[in-house]
């Protein structure tokens, strides 16, 4: 039950054993025990990924097309799949389980899986380095804010909760995805508007979020229109900020202690106004913004005063994290 994010050619063998391992991991996912990790690809593994595509319909099929093309062109090399959900395999039952019928959970794998794992893994590790402390001693919240967006609570390098759930649609407001949504909404729309399951699924994934609220999925355009006085853009921006603030608060509570917050991805790395508005609303958690540092941040930077909980801009490096995991699997580290 995974989201394929990276395929890199490498050195290695043992295809059938890996396929058996992947199928075993897939079965364990349906039992809610753990997620798959990086594996060497073969036809059986690819088939298994496609079998699980119902939980990531926008990602797995498209990525498998890339895998198929790469394997055709580089047929002499084995290939490695790195899974976006693997970092969240450590989320405890209290945070991952939904209060739904047992059959849904055990037979159909309905639970939280989380996404953006490679980004959260890289950034949380980099935050510990910036603090000059061992990763095992640092509690952080990573805000991956782009066209897709998620927040993750990381305790000692381990994911303990995240805003995305069964699918990447849950949590923060995104470019075209709703984020948090009352589960009664699809039933309501089916009754009053005759909306089918397929129509609802497409709408919450591709026609919602900023696009649904403003007609544009581009955060820069929404802010430009807000500055020009457009009320719908201002409301959309306020919803985005409120949702981030609410999720940071919810993730900080179970951490017990918060050492740092990191902003990453396209919006998180480049939008000083959003970062400032979020941090100012989180003073209850000891967060604050250094206005000059925040406005001038270009690349990696601390944007909080020395006497507050640390806040950073950390450019994500998912490609590096994918390569690191591949090297680890292939014994090259």
Image (spheres, grey):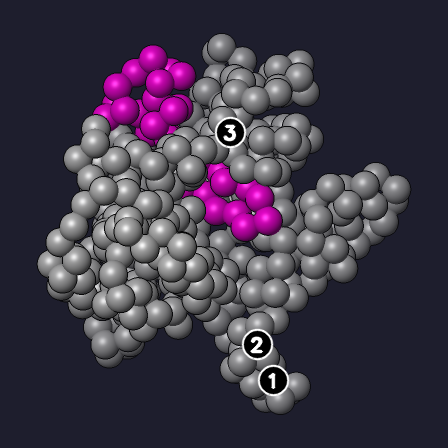
Say what secondary structure mark 1 lies in. Answer: loop
Q: Are marks 2 and 3 in contact (CB under 8 Å)?
A: no
Q: Is residue 35 left or right of residue 252?
A: left
29, above or below 174, in the image:
below
Proximity of marks 2 and 1: CB atoms separated by less than 8 Å: yes
Q: Which image quarter holds the N terminus?
A: bottom left
Q: Magenta stretch: give its range.
A: 124-153
Write the residue at 74% across / 51% down.
Answer: 235
Give x and y (percent) for residue 72: 38, 59
Residue 41 versus residue 239: which sits nearer the camera? 41
Give the residue number, with chain letter if any, for mark 2: 200
Q: Secondary structure at mark 2?
A: helix
Work out how far the residue at label 1 is from the one at label 3, CA to CA, in angstroms: 40 Å
> Against 296, is 207 above or below?
below
For the C terminus, the quadrant is top left
Give the spatial CA distance, label 2 vs label 3.
34 Å
Residue 54 placement: quadrant: bottom left
Q: Is residue 16 magenta?
A: no
| Residue in the picture at 52% in, 47% down | 149
Say which residue appears at 88% left-offset and 42% top-offset.
228
Q: Residues within 10 Å of mark 3 (few under 14, many from 20)?
A: many
219 to the left or right of 136: right
* Tag in front: 2 or 3: 3
Checking the image for residue 315, the label placed there is: 3
Disc 1: which residue: 195
Query: Residue 150 lies in magenta, yes or no?
Result: yes
């Amino acid at each position: 039950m995974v989201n394929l994010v990276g395929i890199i050619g490498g050195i290695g063998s043992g295809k059938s054993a890996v396929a058996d391992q992947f199928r075993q991991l897939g079965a364990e996912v349906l039992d809610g025990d753990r997620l798959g990790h990086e594996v060497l690809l073969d036809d059986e593994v690819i088939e298994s990924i496609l079998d699980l595509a119902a939980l990531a319909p926008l990602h797995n099929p498209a990525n498998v097309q890339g895998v198929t093309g790469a394997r055709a062109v580089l047929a002499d090399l084995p290939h490695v799949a790195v899974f976006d959900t693997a970092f969240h395999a450590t989320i405890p039952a209290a945070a991952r389980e939904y209060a739904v019928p047992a059959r849904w959970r055990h037979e159909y794998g309905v639970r939280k899986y989380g996404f953006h794992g490679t980004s959260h893994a890289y950034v949380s590790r980099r935050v510990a380095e910036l603090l000059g402390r061992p990763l095992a001693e640092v509690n952080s919240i990573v805000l991956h804010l782009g066209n897709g967006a998620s927040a993750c609570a990381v305790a000692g390098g381990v994911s303990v909760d995240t805003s995305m759930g069964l699918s990447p649609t849950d949590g923060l407001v995104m470019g075209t995805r709703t984020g948090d949504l009352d589960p009664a909404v699809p039933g309501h729309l089916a009754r009053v508007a005759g909306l089918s399951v397929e129509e609802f699924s497409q709408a919450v994934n591709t026609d919602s979020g900023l696009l649904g609220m403003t007609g544009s999925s581009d955060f820069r355009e929404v802010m430009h229109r807000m500055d020009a006085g457009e009320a719908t853009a201002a409301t959309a921006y306020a919803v985005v900020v409120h949702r981030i603030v609410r999720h940071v608060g919810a993730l900080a509570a179970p951490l017990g202690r918060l050492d740092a917050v990191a902003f990453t991805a396209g919006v998180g790395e480049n939008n000083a106004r959003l970062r400032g508005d979020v941090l100012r609303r989180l003073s209850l958690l000891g967060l604050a913004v250094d206005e000059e540092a925040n406005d001038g941040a270009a690349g990696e930077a601390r944007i909080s005063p020395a006497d507050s909980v640390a806040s950073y801009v950390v450019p994500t490096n998912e490609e590096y994290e994918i390569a690191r995991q591949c090297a680890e699997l292939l014994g090259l580290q």
